[in-house]
Image (cartoon, rainbow, N blue to C red):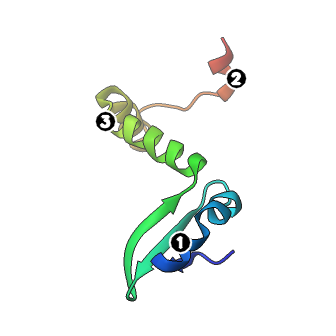
Amino acid sequence: MKNTVTTTEAQANLPRLLRQLPAKKSLTITSHGRIAGFLVSKDRMEAIIETMEILANPEAMKAIQAFEAGHSRGKDISCLEE
């Protein structure tokens, strides 16, 4: 599947484009050679929203910044199961 279509192609083939859009991917829609919008897969959109939520959380950002600065250590993912 190509990653760019025109608005005419998108309008004519939207159901097929939605079925064929791979998870974690997006499709660029152009009009007259310029980007008009994007069709984003459900998985990709959920990941974007999750990232935005983390970025908007001051405590999460402090923890990320502390880890990146070497002031804290990561934990094994198994700790989430507790």
Q: Earlier in the sequence, mark 1 or mark 3?
A: 1
- Which quarter of the figure has residue 53? top left
Position of 45 compared to 3: left or right? Answer: left
- Mark 1 residue type: Ala
The amino acid type, in three-letter code, at marker 2 is: Ser
Indicate which label's residue lies in the foreground, 1 or 3: 1
Mark 1 lies on a secondary structure that is helix
Q: Nearer the viewer, residue 82 or 18?
A: 18
Graded by Cα atoms within 10 Å as few (under 14), some (14 to 19) or many (20 or more), the crowding at tag 3 reads few
Q: Which mark is residue 78?
A: 2
In terms of depth relative to the viewer, which is nearer, 15 or 23?
A: 15
Q: Position of residue 51 (x, y in %)?
A: 44, 42
The residue nearer to you, when weighing 74 against 11, is: 11
In percent of width and height, residue 8 lies at 49, 79
Distance between the Cα atoms at labels 1 and 3?
33 Å
In depth, the one of 33 and 66 nearer the eye is 33
Question: In this picture, is 30 found above or below 41?
Answer: below
Distance between the Cα atoms at labels 1 and 2?
A: 43 Å
